[in-house]
Amino acid sequence: MKNKLFMATIAAAIAIPVMVAPIPNHYAEAAETKGTVVLANNPFKDVKVNSPYYKIIHEMRDAGIIQGYEDGTFRPDTTISRQHAAALVSRALKINGLTLEKTKEFKQPKDLRTDSPFYDDIKSLVEAGLLEMDSQGNVNPNKALTRGEMAKIIAVAFNLDVKADYVFGDVKGSKYEEYVKALYSNGVTTGYEDYTFKLNGSLTRVHYVLFMHRAMNIDTDFVAKPIPTPTPKPEPKPDPKPTSKGPVKYSDWSYQDIKTKIPRPAGYVAGEHEKKNAEVLSEIVKENGHGFRTSFDIEANSPTRTSSTFFKDFEDELRFSAEQVGVTYDEYVSIINRVIETGEVYNSGSFAMYFNYQNGRIYETGVRNN
């Protein structure tokens, strides 16, 4: 009966000049139309003709169920509040000659003024047990409506029966289980792609209108399919740290891995650690009269190194640098690895160095061994 009343209301709406525009098939499927859509008279500014909800939104508007805003917009993607949800379902019930059964005594909410334009709508839903007040006695009219609350409101308001005992895994055992079953078994909702319903999630104005429209136009031939069990997503495996095989630790890693995956020393604070070590190095230069400063990437295949014609490779550069500061190659490599491991400044008196974790470079000062 309610479906016939709704369609009669649509037929009684003000006549609209008819224009037909083609829309893509994927929109036609989503909008449940057959490839064309009747252009509405004075459509909402923010509801485009290629929207899959264009026809439904304007059909519901012309039936007097939705009104939109004074600026001519509908704001389809705005989250719907409890008070707006109450207003929409109340209008639909009045249009279809339906009423809600009072199951609870109404107690005046602390946060609802009697002169609110939504007062009667909210009062009706509270008395029917479709909107609950919190422990402080507030009905929270501006709070977002949850999907669980939506399911209860629509299932009860439009007398939807459970036609199949299929339940979403994240709904089973909840106080909304039977209401969501009613929506699913009547084709009002399909849930999410991961076979969940998300009771506590919010919904947009356009989706609330869509659920209402489906509930008011139930397909009597619809047969719900069993809900598959969600396949748990595999736990993401931690990004394995690359191994190091070069003489200098991590030198065969990529530049990005060097900057992000080298273990930091205890208490490391990015930026502050490097700044402190740079200050220590400057003091060592003053105290020891170091005559040179240099820095180099520990990445063996650094573009600046591979483009150089002075050194054959990274090992050749290390041997040269070790000779310049008067230590053996093995000693020099060991010192570099030590500062990378510890985060400390090495100081032999004749030369000093530290490692910058943020850019992957060794900073060195010293007295050249000529």
Image (cartoon, rainbow, N blue to C red):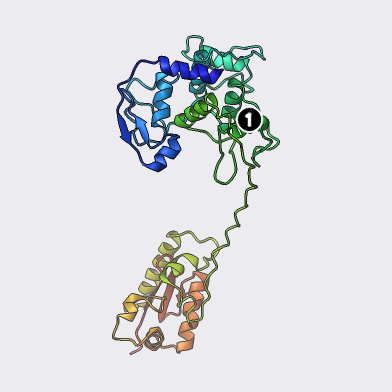
- Residue 315, quarter of the rendered image: bottom left
Q: What residue is shown at x 39% (from left), y 42% (from top)?
A: 25
Q: Position of residue 115 (x, y in %)?
A: 48, 9
Circle 1 residues within 10 Å: few <14, some 14–19, many ≥20: many
Q: To which quarter of the image does residue 14 belong?
A: top left
In the rendered image, residue 305, in percent from the top left (x then y), is placed at 34, 79
Q: Is residue 49 above or below residue 318?
A: above
Q: Looking at the picture, which amino acid does disc 1 mark?
A: Ala
Count of labels shown?
1
Q: Residue furthest right?
A: 173
* Percent x, y of residue 196: 60, 42
* Front-most of residues 345 and 193: 193
Identify the residue at horizontal 40%, vertical 67% (top origin).
Answer: 359
Give the quadrant of the C terminus. bottom left
Q: From the viewer's perspective, is residue 107 above or below residue 221?
A: above
Q: Nearer the viewer, residue 176 or 350?
A: 176
The answer to whether 166 is drawn above or below residue 144 in the figure is below
Q: Is residue 158 found left or right of 282 in the rendered image?
A: right
- Location of the N terminus by quadrant is top right
Q: Is residue 143 visible?
A: no
Of 327 and 161, the residue lying toward us:
161
Residue at the spot 31% in from the left edge and 22% down from the top edge? 41
Residue 149 visible? The answer is: yes
- Residue that carries the numbered disc 1 in the rendered image: 182
Secondary element type, mark 1 = helix
- Residue toward you, 216 or 104: 216
Residue at the far top: name it: 115
Q: Quadrant of residue 200?
A: top right
